[in-house]
Image (cartoon, rainbow, N blue to C red):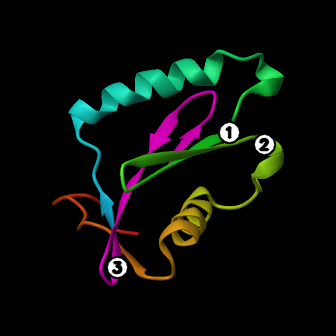
Amino acid sequence: MSGISTDSITYSVFIGKKGYIQYCNVVADDRENLDLLWELAFTPPPASRCEAIEMFIKSGKLTTNILYAKDIDLEKDEFEVRDEVVHSYFGDDKIVYPPMPFGSWEL
């Protein structure tokens, strides 16, 4: 799932495992894909730009859902929306995030 705004693009990868959903860190080599999303964000006229793109891969088949501002509650926390999308695809299993890097601040 990716989120697109005028100043940034987010890119999240989740993998369904038996009994849980694994969040995967995006490594520097994978960030080249963001260039494609950035170009997609600014190709259409501003009124037609998308807010997010959901991409699901299952059994080698890709399903894509492009979301526009009217499709998203922009007042809702983006992480809450992301979790809702993940659960809509993978079910209600717990999402497991990797530990925070040493020295990072805690919430």
Going by the image, does 45 lie left or right of 3? Answer: right
- Mark 3: which amino acid? Tyr
Residue at the image position 42 percent from the left and 50 percent from the top: 12
Q: CA distance from mark 2 to mark 3?
A: 30 Å
User: Label 2 neighbourhood size at 10 Å, few (<14), some (14-19), many (20+)?
Assistant: few
> Please, what secondary structure does the residue beneath circle 1 have?
loop
Residue in the foreground of this view, choosing between 76 and 95: 95
Q: Nearer the viewer, mark 2 or mark 3?
A: 3
Residue in the foreground of this view, choosing between 53 and 4: 53
Q: Which mark is residue 5?
A: none
- Mark 2: which amino acid? Ala
Quadrant for the C terminus, please. bottom left
Residue at the image position 58 percent from the left and 63 percent from the top: 85
Which region is colored magenta? 1-21
Q: Which mark is residue 51?
A: 1
Going by the image, does 39 lie left or right of 27? Answer: right
Q: Which mark is residue 69?
A: 2
Going by the image, does 50 lie left or right of 34? Answer: right
Q: CA distance from mark 1 to mark 3?
A: 28 Å
Count of numbered circles on the image: 3
- Mark 1: which amino acid? Glu
The prevailing secondary structure element of the residues shown in magenta is strand
